[in-house]
């Protein structure tokens, strides 16, 4: 087992999940509470990674963050190195690629909150920030938990974006999915079985936690 790749994968998934929750909660609140036709375009843009092939997204990001574009050259001038083929670049790619898995569950959770409660909070003078933090977030906490777990697992299993944007650099961009690909390519099926088993256990454990948390003590799902 490549423990360095496992640690890097868990680090990438954790950092990506934290960033996505910080982005997805206000974005979901804007999509649910906001008004305007432009919100439909914003929602479609946030869902784009669902239908865009990962390798295509990874290629676009590779070009954008590289020295061939003015944006990429600006990043290089600011940081002193390109984001491509670095852990920071993987974080950027993972955040973009997993954005729908954070936004859509939270949008569904916020939309399920009774409209009368939202209207009452507004009549009492609650600001938008207080409305989201004091009402929507507590009532949609299970949706937020589901979004966090989905983002984490989706990042753990990333392959196309990681391969295109990060390559295979040990200790920097080599994740478990890359390790598994290398093991299969080298016909090392015993090692590939162990790597795949770890990924399977992580996924099943996290999903079991979601479904267990969604059931009240009486046994029926909320």
Image: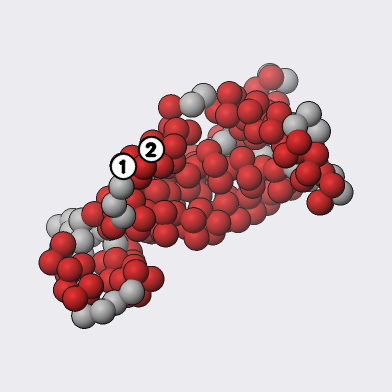
Decide if residue 17 is on the left or right side of residue 102.
Answer: right
Residue 67 in the image: x percent, y percent?
Answer: 81, 33
Whether residue 151 appears in this view of the structure is: yes
Farthest residue, direction bottom: 124
Q: Residue at 48%, 33% (x, y): give it.
A: 49
Q: For the N terminus, which image quadrant?
A: top right
Decide if residue 32 is on the left or right side of residue 167.
Answer: left
Residue contact between numbered discs 2 and 1, judged by CB atoms under 8 Å? yes
Q: Give the quadrant of residue 33.
A: bottom left
2 or 1: mark nearer the eye: 1
Residue 45 in the image: x percent, y percent?
Answer: 44, 37
Q: Which residue is mark 1?
A: 37
| Picture layout, residue 31 above or below residue 182 | below
Residue 78: assigned label? none
The number of discs equals 2
Count residues near mark 1 (Cα–Cα under 10 Å), then give few for <14, some for 14-19, many for 20+: few
| Picture layout, residue 114 above or below residue 207 | below
Distance of label 2 from label 1 (alpha carbons): 7 Å
Q: Give the quadrant of residue 2.
A: top right
Whether residue 166 appears in this view of the structure is: no
Residue 16 in the image: x percent, y percent?
Answer: 57, 51
Mark 1, secondary structure of its residue: loop
Residue 200 in the image: x percent, y percent?
Answer: 49, 40
| Picture layout, residue 25 above or below residue 190 | below
Foreground residue among 123 and 210 = 123
Foreground residue among 47 and 4 = 47
Q: Residue at 64%, 54% (x, y): give it.
A: 11
Q: Residue at 50%, 42% (x, y): give it.
A: 98
Q: Which residue is mark 2?
A: 41
């Amino acid at each position: 087992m490549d423990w360095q790749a496992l640690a890097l994968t868990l680090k990438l998934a954790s950092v990506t999940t934290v960033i996505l929750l910080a982005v997805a909660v206000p974005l979901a609140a804007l999509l649910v509470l906001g008004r305007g036709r432009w919100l439909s375009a914003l929602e479609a843009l946030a869902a784009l990674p669902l239908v865009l092939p990962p390798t295509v997204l990874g290629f676009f990001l590779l070009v954008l963050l590289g020295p061939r574009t003015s944006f990429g050259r600006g990043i290089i001038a600011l940081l002193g190195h390109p984001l491509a083929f670095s852990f920071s670049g993987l974080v950027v790619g993972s955040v973009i690629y997993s954005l729908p898995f954070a936004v859509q569950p939270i949008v569904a959770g916020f939309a399920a909150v009774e409209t009368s409660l939202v209207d009452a909070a507004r009549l009492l003078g609650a600001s938008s920030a207080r409305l989201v933090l004091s009402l929507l977030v507590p009532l949609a906490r299970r949706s937020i938990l589901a979004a966090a777990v989905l983002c984490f697992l989706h990042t753990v299993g990333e392959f196309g974006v990681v391969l295109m944007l990060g390559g295979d650099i040990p200790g920097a961009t080599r994740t478990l999915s890359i390790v598994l690909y290398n093991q299969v390519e080298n016909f090392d099926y015993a090692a590939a079985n162990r790597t795949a088993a770890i990924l399977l256990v992580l996924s099943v454990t996290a999903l079991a936690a979601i479904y267990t948390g969604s059931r009240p003590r009486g046994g029926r799902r909320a």
